[in-house]
Image (cartoon, rainbow, N blue to C red):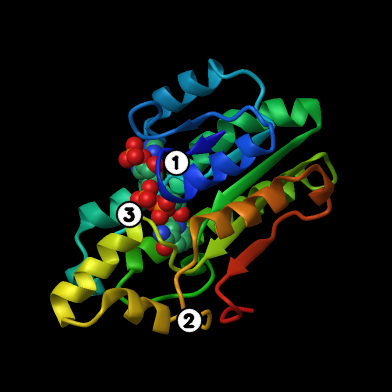
Amino acid sequence: MVTGGTRGIGAAVAARFRAAGDEVVAVGRAECDVTDEDAVASFFAGLGPVDVLVNNAGISTSAPLARTQLADWEAQLTVNATGAFLCTRAVLPGMSSRDCGRIVTVASVAGRVGFRYTSGYTASKHAAVGLMRAVAAEVAGTGVTSNAVCPGYVRTDMTDQTVRRIEERTGRDGEAALAAMSPLGRLLEPEEVAFAVAFLAAPEAGAVNGQTLVLDGGGVQ
Ligand code: NDP
């Protein structure tokens, strides 16, 4: 089950699992708004057993802290952190009773370190990582694991918006500016994130729990 699976990283994750022969449900806002408690509960109730939950749905905005609107702060916390909480809560009892399951949260390098002009996004991704770790502590020693991938900038619609904002404000090449901010020196491709998600979701990854797998070429270690 992949939230935010209609585009970008979520679509690449869904494609990777499908190519491996897995039955994949990948949905966007229209099918299951992860911020809506009742919608999440009824969606998951209709799904049946979930082997792998990928908490991928996310939004981002950027502004210096002093110009950050409360509505933008709250929207990011609600989608990126509360959404992961609601979906995780929906699948965990079933995974625990079957003693089998994988929860993989698509966080961000902003879930590990602070970046300027992204206070709401950074706080929401730290919250998502905190949730992932708390769940990992609860399921430790069982057949369920909870982990996160933490990518740098990935070539998706979300990053396109950032590229455009940089170009409008500075006149510089936005993609080159983002690439230069990363030790990797380029954007990640969605398929590279999907590979990391598939690794954490694999049956053989049962000893990996409570971890953040950073995909930034070596900047955050
Ligand atoms: P996109 O903007 O390309 O896609 C976002 C996806 O999330 C869409 O499928 C969208 O659905 C879905 N979504 C948004 N809000 C909700 C909601 N309330 N309920 C359900 N689904 C929702 O994003 P990316 O693929 O770039 O990002 C995916 C995840 O990866 C996010 O959590 C993001 O923070 C994280 N990430 C992204 C990075 C990047 O550089 N792009 C870097 C690090 C992490 P719909 O199509 O219906 O709107």
Q: Which quarter of the figure is the C terminus placed in?
A: bottom right
Residue at 37% across / 77% down in the picture?
178
Look at label 3 and name its amino acid. Asp
Q: Specify whether 22 is left or right of 170.
A: right
Label 1 residue SS: helix
- Looking at numbered disc 2 in the image, what kind of residue is underneath it? Gly
| Residue bearing the label numbered 2 | 185
In this picture, residue 158 sits left or right of residue 207: left
Cα–Cα gap, marks 1 and 3: 20 Å
**Residue 215: % across, % down:** 58, 68
Give the x, y percent position of residue 56: 49, 46
- Reply above or below: 126 against 172: above
The kind of residue tagged 1 is: Gly
Q: Which residue is mark 3?
A: 157
Task: Say left or right for 139 vs 46.
Answer: right
Whole-number angstrom distance, CA of label 1 to CA of label 2? 31 Å
As helix, strand or loop, the secondary structure at mark 2 comes to loop
